[in-house]
Amino acid sequence: MADLPDDVNISLPDTPRAAVEQLIALDTTSRDGNVPAIELLQRWLSDHGVITHVLREDDGINANLIGVFPSRHQAGGADGGQESVGALLPERALTPSDQLSRDLIGELSGVGKGGVDRLDSPTDGATSANPSADGATSSADAAEAPAAGERRGVLIAGHADCVPVDGQDWDSDPFTATERDGLLYGRGTCDMKSYLAVFAQMAGRFQAADLDEPVIFAATWEEETTCNGARELVKQLDALGIHPRVAFVGEPTMMTAIASHKSMNSFQATFHGIAAHSSLLPRGLNAIRYAGEFITWYHREVIDRLVEEGPSDDAFPVPHTTGGVNVVDAGIAGNTVPDHAHLTFEFRALPSVDVPAVVRDIQAKIDELDTAMKAAVPDDPADPSAAKKVGAQLTINSLLYPLDAAPDGPAATLAKTLGRDVQAEKVTYGTESGIYEHAGMSAVVIGPGDIAQAHGANEFVSLDQLAACEDFFAALLTHLETAQ
Ligand SMILES: [Zn+2]
């Protein structure tokens, strides 16, 4: 368990920058889990008396944190006021120390593992509850989600994991936030611990405020690899009776609101053949041959078709869908019939592309090749045990929803009210925001720093961007205090 190390400074930071520095000091590379950052954020919130939920993932290294700042309508009266706060009410009776111990023990999510978005989409568009999104909405999900008019609250969401620093040449220690020329360097400064740290540092102000609408703070796991933390978060919020109206997802956008990005869909295909000395070809089965067939088909029939015949939108820097087979791992020697080929491939589609239909086509092609390989197994294979495993399989690594928010939708409108611009250009990188949009929230991406600095060596966020982020949250606080 990668819990908070003993030597970590867990004191309440008195400035947003100090909060960022404390969070950067924790190495929460996705493969090692995000628990140290979750615990630190939880302690800050808890020390301000904020209701928190730490929902540990059963992998033991990850957790989601939910912090709830109730509205004035929830705070008053035993009946829970005018809004349903569901399971939150019993929590309010706990003392801070009860809550703290319970949170640190953690509650395992009882709602199952996250996974791939929208595989069980209805084939009949007429049954889709939200056909405008992309025609691929899961009717089961959508039917359970409250209607927009019944939703209350603003979700401040971000991921607490970060990408590795392996092999990167940093000018200073990536886990020691270091200022040079008004820029704060460190892994996660821009993607995206600053957003979480700045809000958490302001938690006391939100807790003390008389809010017209609840604010929900959420820090998730594994955004950089699977986005499964966000998928779990949606279920966890639902189980807690929390249904936010708006989601602000703090990926780096230079504090302008971004309302649209492509879907990200990644896969692996494995082809098992039969190894043999290459001079004994008839007793082997060449896995690369079938993988090669797939590679050509995928580029011609999926990617090229989507480029030529699919939707196009000039608001994206690359206006069409993109994709390709990007990793091939196959074979062992020039004189050996290869018994394996592993492919890693992806496509990034415009929001209007019917992703499940594309996935079904890919699966059908893999099934066709699987059948062909099994039919080609020789009568006297060089390796009889390998002959039993011959075939092709598809693994879906991730299908991440696109974001397709209306520029005049609730999230973009609120961002404008808070003084931020809504960017006309759309972006090609993926975020968790599409998951929140699909769950019924109006979502935009808005956070400090520039995506150009994410993931590389010498990642930084400018102190100006930290200030802009603080201003944004302060504007939200003022807005929610004065709104009636
Ligand atoms: Zn990120």
Image (tube, rainbow, N blue to C red):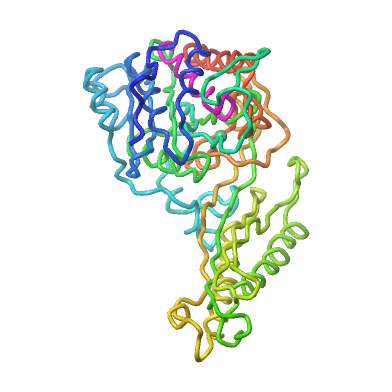
Left or right of 173 in this view: 13: left
The residue positioned 50% from the left and 58% from the top of the image is 121
Q: Which residues are magenta?
A: 186-205
**Above or below for 149 versus 376:** above
> In this rendering, does residue 350 appear at all?
yes
Residue 455, by quadrant, is top right
**Above or below for 423 versus 340:** above
For residue 203: magenta? yes
Q: Quadrant of the N terminus?
A: top left
> In this rendering, does residue 408 appear at all?
no
Residue 305, by quadrant, is bottom right
Left or right of 64 in this view: 335: right
**Above or below for 313 versus 169:** below
Q: Position of residue 294 (x, y in %)?
A: 64, 69
**Above or below for 215 versus 231:** above
Q: Position of residue 190 (x, y in %)?
A: 59, 26
Residue 237 or 178: which is nearer the viewer? 178
